[in-house]
Image: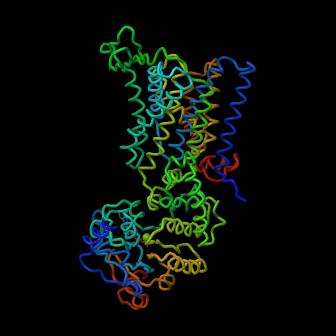
Amino acid sequence: MAEKKQFQKGKMVPVPSVSIIPERDLDKSPILECSHLGIDFGGLTAVNEFNVTVGRTEIAGLIGPNGAGKTTVFNLLTKVYQPTRGTILLDGLDTHGKTPSQVNRMGIARTFQNIRLFNNLTVEDNVKIGLHNQEKYSMFSGILRLPKYWRQEKAAHERALELLSIFDMQDLANHQAGSLPYGAQRRLEIVRALATNPSLLLLDEPAAGMNPSETAELMENIVKIRDTFQIAIMLIEHDMSLVMGICEGICVLNFGQIIAKGTAEEIQSNPTVIEAYLGKQQ
Amino acid sequence: MKKINKNSLNGFINYGIVIAAFAVIQALLGMGRLSNSLQSLLVPACCYIVMAVSLNLTVGILGELSLGHGGFMSLGAFSGIAASILLQNAIPLAPARLAVSMAVGALAGALGGVIVGVPVLRLQGDYLAIVTLAFGQIIKNIIMVLYVGVDERGIHIAASSERFDLAPGGTAIIKGPMGAVGVTKLATFTAGFILILITLAVVQNLVNSRAGRAIMALRDNRIAAESVGINTTKYKLMAFVTSAALAGAAGALFGLNYSSTGASKFDFNTSILVLVFVVLGGLGSIRGSIIAAALLYVLPEMLRGLGLNDFRMLIYAIVLILVMLATNNDQLKALLGRVIPKRKGAVTSG
Ligand SMILES: Nc1ncnc2c1ncn2[C@@H]1O[C@H](COP(=O)(O)OP(=O)(O)OP(=O)(O)O)[C@@H](O)[C@H]1O
Ligand SMILES: [Mg+2]
């Protein structure tokens, strides 16, 4: 613990980022602080000067036209790409030089815009793979089937069903993940990410391909997840009813730059945002 | 109340098949109904079954291509033979010496797996295929020039016959191109049967555990596996080294089944042969590997008299290419799908 504190001190954000934290989270330290975050692909600057702070129990939205760099931000946060510039602090700890799996163990979990499930495995196994770092027995306990194996496998089985029940999917536990309908695959990805016990959950277009009633249900479930797990959720979404409905802080990206930050009302009346979106429509 | 997990059920069926086959063969042996030539195939068939199941761990369950499984078998064979000769006086009881020699073979295989795996499995891409291919060749070439012997002054290792100065009373273990000679044949069919059961237990229990799920997650989607906190290199290495260790044990049993064994018995052809068993049996299907290895090893041996033997590798190669085409070509898949009822569920431990 002492070591953690020290680390925290030396790596605080040099320039305080503009806060979009909801009031109830203000007295606690933010879960995520990005400052001057940016990445270049060859000559193309895909993301630049990304300064965002997310509160402990905030539902934050990241929106913007196609190709704005939203998914790239998620890939930077989860270290699929190493940033060219800037720092990312998760719970005050710098994630510099970490691998994607290390960042997950630090507390960031995500879903993917183009679904990435373990298609040949069952729904339950997909969730159990999410529980990987919660289970603690060694390969040898597994091969020799020691009591530790049976105990933890039973716990993992129960936990997996419990997590699946968030989306009422426990009956699908023995189905092959790749054979599920599209919407169910998206929900399973969220469950798998939640299984890793994150403090920040990143959802990349969770409502894509869902019909309005599925989307409405998803909105309720996202809020329910935040309330029960008391975690921060950051989501990318093109469905404005979802974003404006549940996101407390919203950040708008265009050509890799943040053009606006604020609450739903502020964003909806922001002339720059309207221009960016209308410009795209014409 | 509690349903039996489908994977564990499949596992039990596999044990059942192996035990039943063993019982039937033992009965036939007892009645004297098995010809000498068939009897001589029993131990090597067991070895090839272990080879196929263990290679399936790397190719089918981890999803990495290995073209040098024979190299690990070779390591196991020669280290196992050396152990059996060196321990002749220390462990007079033959089955115990065989068990220890197989354990030594497994260790040697595992060591080879670590040496190949640590640098290569960090990389993404098909590097493992290339490096294992080279590895098999290198092991063969090293053993071709290696002289190992023991006399009252201790163990002698040399890279050429001139420098190999064994005292007159000493025992040569490996003699370069001639390989291992004067080996006491310790291998038994029962030992082969037990090794298959151990292999099944290791692979099947691994697959149905936390580590096995991590391994299959890497196969299905590496980026997603990393996103849920799985350490890629660690689990790739775990599968690969386990696979190599089992191949080493099979090699030791194989080597101790003949009075002399040359390095050329574990060449590229051997590696490809085992790969053919795995692909034909079905990637990820343990039962498929067992059946394919048993049938495809024993049948051609029985047909040796028909003069087909010269074409054996050619036939395997053609069959392998056809299977690869069939599994990659959508039209062919659709055609096969109409002929063969679709297999349901996961390709895990079927
Ligand atoms: N690996 C890469 N190499 C080169 N360019 C990339 C790479 N990844 C993303 N880009 C570029 O970065 C820009 C932002 O892409 P990104 O996928 O982040 O957009 P997005 O906001 O998620 O769009 P969408 O709404 O369509 O998902 C695009 O111009 C894209 O071509
Ligand atoms: Mg995107």
Residue B251 appears anywhere in the view: no
Residue sitting nearer the eye, B163 or A121: B163
Eyeballing the image, is A17 above or below A94? below
Q: Nearer the viewer, residue B316 or A117?
A: A117
x, y percent for residue B297:
61, 28
Camera sees residue B245: yes
Residue B286 higher or lower than A6, as above or below? above
Q: How many marks?
A: 0
- Residue A265, given in percent of the width and then of the height, sits at 43, 91
Q: What residue occupies the far right of the structure in this picture? A: B31
Give the colouring mode of the picture: rainbow
Identified at 50% across, 48% down, the residue is A139
Q: On the picture, is B343 further left or further right than B254? A: right
Query: What percent of the width, then of the height, locates residue B316?
Result: 56, 31
Percent across and percent down for residue A152 are 56, 57
Q: Quadrant of the N terminus of chain B?
A: bottom right
Q: Is residue A69 left or right of residue B66?
A: left
Relative placement, left or right, of B199 versus A102 is right
Q: Quadrant of ligand 1?
A: bottom left
State the image quarter where residue B120 is shown.
top left
- The residue at 58%/33% (across/down) is B195
Foreground of the two, B344 or B95:
B95
